[in-house]
Amino acid sequence: MLRLTRRMDRRRFLKGAAKACAAIAVPTIIPSSALGLGNRAAPSERIVLGGIGIGGRGSGVLAGMLPEPDVQFVAVADVQKSRRDAAKAMADARNGNTDCATYRDFRELLARPDIDAVLIACGDRWHTIASIHAAAAGKDIYCEKPISITIAETRAMESAVDRAGIVFQGGMQRRNVGNFVFAANLARSGKLGRIHTVHAHMMSPATTQEWLPAQPEPPKEECDWDTWLGPCPWRPYNAAYLRGCGAWIPHFDLSAGGILGWGSHTIDLCQWAADLEHTHAVEYEPTEDGGIARYANGIKLVMRMDGWMGLGTCSARYEGDEGWVEAGDTGQVRCHPASLLAERKIQTVEGTNPGGHAREFFDCVRSRRLPSANHHVAANSHITSHAAQIAWWLNRPLKWDPAKYEFTNSDEANRLRSRAMREPWTI
């Protein structure tokens, strides 16, 4: 409501200013972008966007957001100067000026009243805290996955979004990628018969608690190492941690393992296709490369690294009494009976392009509708992923109560629902 009111005030101001200018016979040159020309919405109609943690993945998502005619990216916060500068250069090139602001502390960005929404794409350990702060500041959120690294963080994020009443879209972009949409709709349509088994592609679940060797810490302006670590236990600086998510994902303190890392996409796809977005699996049995989980209605979830049909990473497979379908990141789909493929219409967004998912988010920012990967949907698939990862770590079968958010047969597993956070960060 406040956002819409602010825009109306700006419209009245611009109309009044236009009348005042008309009364003064002085020629004025106004950039076409300020009038909403050149494939850009007028300033009063734009969604003003900021970014928190715009590195490799973040810059890819931002590149898909910048072309949207009703979006203007005005600020970036990142603890690494190189990434701040790179995101600013992208935004300035799109905006045709040098106005994109840069911050080392994301809280300074969130304090800006002109920013409507934020893209959060920092490391996994930061997603929940940044989301909670953004929600408290009244900003709509597009948050990359995993949205959390513990069950406790997941629930804290969900509660914060509910309290704030903002729009939240988890970065599970395959919900808006054509081949995955076709596969999920086929499963939900009943044309495969009753769905009994769903399969989710995994990364290696293994994690390590070893530290990389200490190296000289760079100047704070170049890389604020203490803030990069954030709520995680302190460890000495090593440049290898900064070389993309592949460098820090195996480290337990900094992430939560491959079942969560890939499952935040693929388990989410499985729960969507099987109409299980409202709940979590209730039984978990670890396997060498993932695990098997079961839902209260009897549907089985198979989490595995191998045995796929070669359709690409983040593959998902749905099996029913009368057929099956499998999709992956190559944009391909295979199914049985094969005749069902005739119903597929190739969409402009295929592969792993995040553009359609971002567009859905911006449409929901305007309409205030829940996006497809909203905070409840994202929380439910993440909790299933977390529980499966915990079962793998402990190497024992676990039972989960979705109503109480607790394991019913392991105190040790319940202790792994949360982690201590390093001050001053907390949820």
Image: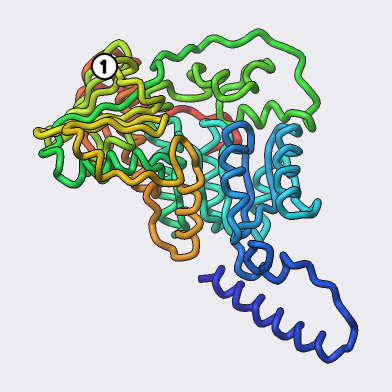
Binning the other alpha carbons within 10 Å of mark 1 as few (below 14), some (14 to 19) or many (20 upward) gives many
Q: Tell me the residue that label 1 is attached to.
A: 286
Q: Is residue 299 visible?
A: no
**Residue with the most extreme bottom position:** 23
Place residue 323 in its image quadrant: top left
The type of colouring in the image is rainbow
Inspect the image, locate mark 1, and give the three-letter code of the amino acid beneath it: Pro
Residue at point 20%, 23% (across, down) = 409
Place residue 206 in its image quadrant: top left
**In the rendering, at what x and y percent does residue 207 appear?**
45, 14
Q: Is residue 137 left or right of residue 114?
A: left
Residue at point 31%, 33% (across, down) = 333
268 lies above or below 393: below
190 lies above or below 296: below
Q: Is residue 1 left or right of residue 66?
A: left
Quick one: 27 or 348, which is closer to the camera? 348
Residue at point 74%, 44% (across, down) = 88
Quick one: 218 or 272, which is closer to the camera? 272
Q: Secondary structure at mark 1?
A: strand
